[in-house]
Image: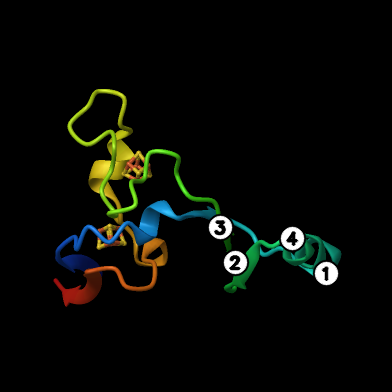
Amino acid sequence: MTFKFERKGSCLICGNCCKVLKIKIKYRVTGDVVKYLETRGVRVKRGGKYTILTIDYPCPYLLPTGKCKLKGMEDRPLICDESPVRKWQLVDGCGYRFEEVKY
Ligand code: SF4
Ligand code: SF4
């Protein structure tokens, strides 16, 4: 049996995902690297073989209403239309969730 995660829910246009940068690294950072990142204000979450970094860094195109100034424009990255596509990309307050589905 195969398991997959399917995205459910919808965008609440809260803008929370535009206030942070989340980056997944495919190895586990340790020791002084963690200390350095946390000293620099980066939130570090570690799994067995990966690390997720969260940096408070609001996008300059985020409007105070939570809407995107580039909505509908060619300059807007495709990632902004498609995210979140993985569970680790979810941020607090997001209207999406990922549910496990058996195949
Ligand atoms: S370009 Fe728009 S959707 Fe993309 S991160 Fe910035 S504000 Fe958010
Ligand atoms: S955090 Fe989720 S609900 Fe809020 S704008 Fe981003 S994708 Fe939409």
What residue sits 61% from the left and 72% below the top? Answer: 46
Amino acid type, callout 2? Lys
Q: Report the disc number at residue 37.
A: 4
Residue at the far top: name it: 74
Separation of marks 1 and 3 at Cα, in angstroms: 22 Å
Q: Is residue 64 left or right of residue 24?
A: left
Q: Which residue is mark 2?
A: 49
Circle nearer the N terminus (3, 4): 4
Separation of marks 3 and 4 at Cα, in angstroms: 13 Å
Q: Secondary structure at mark 4?
A: helix
Circle nearer the N terminus (4, 2): 4
Q: Nearer the viewer, mark 2 or mark 1?
A: 1
Q: From the top left corner, tell me how far across and down residue 86 is, in percent.
A: 34, 60
Q: From the top left corner, tell me how far across and down residue 97 is, in percent.
A: 24, 72
Q: Is residue 18 above or below residue 35?
A: above
Residue at the far right: name it: 32
Q: Which residue is mark 3?
A: 56
Separation of marks 1 and 4 at Cα, in angstroms: 10 Å
Amino acid type, callout 1? Gly
Q: Quadrant of residue 1?
A: bottom left
Q: Is residue 89 above or below residue 97?
A: above
Q: Is residue 63 above or below residue 56?
A: above
Q: From the top left corner, tell me how far across and down residue 28 is, in percent.
A: 67, 64
Separation of marks 2 and 3 at Cα, in angstroms: 24 Å
